[in-house]
Each structure stands twice: as C-alpha cells, then as structure tokens.
Image (cartoon, rainbow, N blue to C red):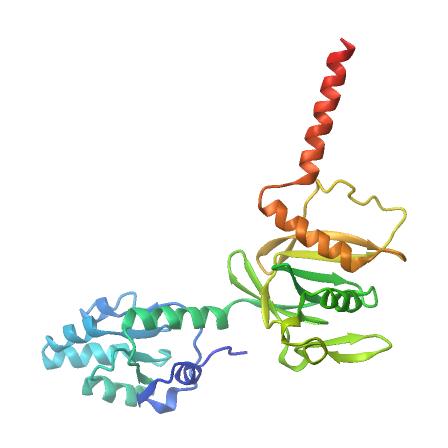
Amino acid sequence: MVKVRTKDIIEKFGLELIAGEEGINRPITTSDISRPGLEMAGYFDYYPAERIQLIGKTELSFAEKLNNSERQIRLERLCTDITPGIIVTRGLDIPEEMIEAAERESVPVLRSKQKTTRFSSLLTNFLESKLAPTTAVHGVLVDIYGVGVLITGKSGVGKSETALELVKRGHRLVADDCVEIRQEDEDNLVGNSPELIEHLLEIRGLGIINVMTLFGAGAVRSYKKISVVMNLELWDPKKQYDRLGLDEERMKIIDTEVTKLTIPVRPGRNLAVIIEVAAMNFRLKRMGMNAAEQFTNRLSDVIEDGDHDDR
C-alpha cells in the first residue's frame, strides 16, 4: 500500500502546481530529498531519480548561466518516469525548459514560497513520519507520569479495566485494544490509536465508553513515545517471578528493543497502582537510581562485614 503520494505534500504544504498535473498520484518511496546541484552541472551517473528534487536559488542561478542547449538537456534529464516531483523554493521563476519537460514526462513541478533549507527540514520530517515502518499491537497505551506504558496480555486479563483505573488516577489514555506503532528512528517508537476507536475504552459488562467525554480533554492524548511494555499474565504458581528487579527483559517491536516487565495477575492485586509505581520506578532507573542494585550492594556490604567479624 502506498503511504504517500505527491498530491499529499501539495495539500500538506499548500504548494503551487506549475506543471505535470497528471503525475500528482506518483508514489513517494523515500524520505530522502535530493538537491540536484551536480546534475545541473551535467553529472547524472548517480542521479537519485526516485527522490523529491528540491531546487533553490543556487541551482536555478547556475542553470541560468548555461547555454540554451545545455540547460534544456539537463532540465529534461531531471524529469524521469519515476521522479515524484520537482519543488522550486523561494517563489522563484521556473525555466520554461523545465515546465515543458515536466509536462511531457508528467512530472509535477511545484513551487513553495519558503526558504530552501527550512522547507527541506519540514518536508523531511513529514516524509519520515509518514514513511516510518509501522505495526499494530493488541494492547493499551497509557501516558503515566510522562512514561509511555504499553500494557499487553491475553484477551480478558484486565488491560482495559486497568487503563480505566489509571485514567481515574489522573493519567492519560492514548489507545485501547489496538495500538498503531511507528518507528520514527532507530530507537524511537511512537504509538497512537486508530482513528475509528480514538478516545474509546471497551469495558466488559459496561460496553464502550468515551474517555474524553467522561473525564475531559486532559484524560487523553493523540500519540506517545513507548518507553516500557508491561505484560499482564495470570499468576502461575509454578513460575518464578523476579522479586528484586535485577533482571531486565527486553522486547523487540519492529527493529527497536524496549524494556518489558511481566506482572502476574491474581485477585487482590491492584494492577493500576502496581503499573503506576512501575512507571515511576522506570523513570528513576533512567535517572540513575536503581533500588534493586542499591539493595544488592548493601546486602553484599553486610555479608562482607559479617565475614570480617567472623575472622
């Protein structure tokens, strides 16, 4: 499925369509942008034709110094059957040779009033967000004290009910049931809710509730970086659960590893409070304060002191 087409950036940035209207449905497959300075100079050996071509004052002023024949040939070679678009910045005048070539090859030629560097940054950020690798996870995403907590577990284990209790305690719901996740860079996962179920929670026996309507706009947010995964599972008496917190389990989502905590569920355990405290403890660890390590070190000191006394 094509994520971004040339017409999407026209609408996003309010670009002026100068030529090549037939090509506005061309797919954009990479967030990389090309500034074809070398191509203007005649070097096309490594021309990245599949990228958006961004032309500013430098490239156009160089093109003006070329003779008519050279300018026509080089501007024609910029327009290929896979080029998603050519964008001219600063509201500059566009050479007729480029307009004619773009019409023949159906390459959209667009114009922006913004400065080249500024527009390049905005366009790159937009394309990286839209073209980032994505996946969907069954779970609940909640913002707890600024920590994005993805709550996972089998159906019926109590994820949504826990999220409701967390919202009542002042935290913010991002997504329930289905969390759409995109990898914005190597170690940055951002989760959001599908538009259809945004702000909604499904509580068995109660049905679907609108969190924003019930608790206000401060109880929800549109997206959040995922920092930790907390997996709820029914208590297994045969399983040894981590009691100190020294063993850090990791979970891979797309290409990014995040910390994973396994929280056993059984009657009498207040899951909302446990998850809330786990989120606070995670923040402390990131600040360099690890209670489990401190306890272990103190225990080691006591044992060593005891050995010295025995001597």
- How far across and how far down the image is residue 187, in percent? 53, 56
Where residue 112 sits in the image (x, y, percent)? 30, 81
User: Which quadrant, please, contains the N terminus?
Assistant: bottom right
| Residue 225: percent from left, percent from top | 58, 62
In the picture provided, is 116 more to the left or to the right than 73? right
Q: Considering depth in this image, is 49 or 138 the residue closer to the camera?
A: 138
Describe residue 55's horizontal placement relative to residue 66 as left or right.
Answer: right
Which quarter of the figure has residue 133?
A: bottom right
Residue 266, x across and y down, in percent: 88, 56
Camera-side residue of 246 and 56: 246
Left or right of 296 in this view: 236 = right
Rendered position, 117 above or below 21: above
Q: Is residue 271 above or below residue 101?
A: above
- Residue at x 61%, y 56% (from the top left corner): 227
Image quadrant occupied by the C terminus: top right
Q: Nearer the viewer, residue 241 or 7?
A: 241
Total numbered labels: 0
**Residue toward you, 277 or 78:** 277
- Can residue 240 be seen at all in this image of the molecule? yes
Q: Is residue 17 above or below residue 156?
A: below
- For image coordinates 34% across by 70% down, the residue present is 120
Q: For the point 60% across and 53% down, which residue is it?
A: 257
The quarter of the picture where residue 113 lies is bottom left
Residue 30 shows in the view: no
Residue at x 89% of width, y 56% of height: 268
Left/right placement of residue 141 relative to residue 274 reads: left
In which quadrant of the rendered view does residue 176 lie?
bottom right
